[in-house]
Amino acid sequence: MIRAKKSFGQNFLVDQRVVEKIIAASEIKPGEAVLEIGPGTGILTAALVAAGAQVTAVEADHDLIAPLQEKFGDKIHLIEGDIFSVISSLNYQLQTTNYKLISNIPYNITSKILETFLTAEHPPSRMVLMVQREVADRITAKPPNMSLLSVVCQLYANVSKVINVPASAFRPAPKVDSAVVRFDRTNSTNRTNNEEVIRLAKIGFSSRRKQLHNNLAGPGIASAETIKAHLISIGLPPTSRAENLSVHNWIALAGLL
């Protein structure tokens, strides 16, 4: 019996209904390239293969490699290693392939995975990822509940929650509930402009209790009165806080400033 290891942040998905939801949200076409990070016992991997995906699976736990090889053989391209260590060797394949990232990822590397693949030079066309439910709620938030995480994710992708997943869907059960989030890459992604918007948003969220014009005026970006006028010009109250702005508001404000 395969035992989950805390050192790898492992919680193995066992609920086939959740797997079916992930596959449906992935909308895989036969022959489509899919990258899976942390296949674990292979429950999602098997469904991806059955859907016709050409799966590249990256597994860091050496003890899982032999069982995965025995289960799938040459049906998948299995790579042993940490995703951030092997990503450079995958770069050529990722550059030349329209691929999707479909994974039940270890929660301790969620932030780094989002940053790596959302901002990649050749990002996946779609990501369907299992994350902590609290993180999913932050990623998909709308005003007046925005956060820096929601701004960053929504700059690079259209995001939507697929399904909430109870802890009982895993073995061992984690201490928190989870959710599946779908990220569809936007065609208008401009990395330079996005970085400018993110820099502005970081300052805007630096003190959540303060109104936005105070946070932005402090570092000398513009005067408080100028910022208030810009907020009004994009249809927002001059007393708005950072969490009140949508991604489109942040893009508009960055353009004005």
Image (cartoon, helix red, strand yellow):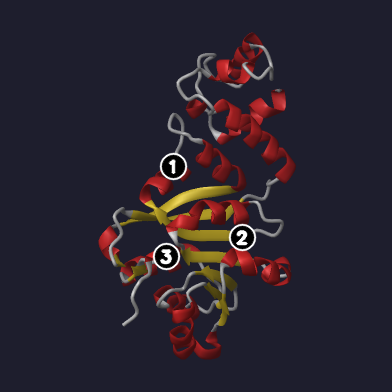
How many tags in the picture?
A: 3
Image vertical order of residue 69 relative to residue 27, above or below? below
Residue at disc 3, secondary structure: helix
In 3D space, how far apart are the residues under numbered discs 2 and 1 (Cα atoms)? 21 Å
Label number found at residue 7: 3
Left/right placement of residue 256 relative to residue 157 reads right
Residue at disc 1, secondary structure: helix
Query: Which residue in the protein does label 1 denote?
Result: 138
In 3D space, how far apart are the residues under numbered discs 1 and 3 (Cα atoms)? 26 Å
Q: How crowded is mark 3: few (under 14 residues within 10 Å), some or many (20 or more)?
A: few
Q: Is residue 140 visible?
A: no
Q: Which residue lies furthest to the front in this view?
A: 7
Label number found at residue 125: 2
Image vertical order of residue 81 relative to residue 198, above or below? below
**Nearer mark to the viewer, of 3 and 2:** 3
> How far across and down, in percent of the image, does residue 120 sit?
67, 56
